[in-house]
Amino acid sequence: MKQLRQLYFKYQDVLAYLIFGGLTTLVNLVVFYVTATLWGWNYQVGNVWAWFLSVLFAYVTNRVWVFHSHYTTMKALMSEIMSFFLARGATLIMDMGIMWIGVSLLQQNEMLTKLVDQVVVVLANYFFSKWFVFKKGKASSVNEQD
């Protein structure tokens, strides 16, 4: 039992990311399905809406339960939010490129392409978040007043 507890504490951030990353992916897939399939929107428009709503969900869950970010000022919070959205914007470009190749060039099913796409995007998002957005000590190093 002690070894299991040690493993949990060693990998708790990764486990939390997998759980909330899975939920974020679910938000993304559901919004994409509703907009592109049920409502008949262009798949790239649906993709952007899915991205936006899932990024809002991801920011809150990643900040609180995955990376345990604590900002000290409003400026630090805004910097963290901007970093998060910029990093996710980079993977949105990757996301849109994969969707374009899969759907427009290869003529594959939108939802199947979206599922494959999400594997790549979730991995990229984790590394961007860990290395650039929620770096340990980043938020606490900003001590300027609001």
Image (spheres, rainbow, N blue to C red):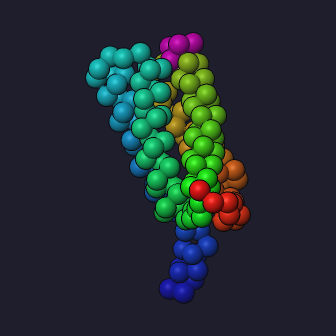
Q: Locate residue 117, reporting x and y percent.
A: 54, 33
Disc tally is 0
- Pick whichever, 129 or 75, lies toward us: 75
- The percent coordinates of residue 103 (x first, y second) are 50, 17
Q: In which quarter of the view is residue 97 placed?
A: top right
Q: Is residue 69 magenta?
A: no
- The prevailing secondary structure element of the residues shown in magenta is helix
- Residue 115, given in percent of the width and then of the height, sits at 47, 34
Let me know if residue 107 appears in the view.
Answer: yes
Q: Is residue 26 above or below residue 92?
A: below
Is 45 placed above or below 78 here? above
**Point 62% across, 30% down: residue:** 94
Which portion, as a residue range, is magenta? Answer: 103-107
Residue found at x 34% / y 25%: 35
Image quadrant containing the C terminus: bottom right
Indicate left or right for 42 with 102 as reference: left
Residue 120 at x, y percent in the picture: 59, 38
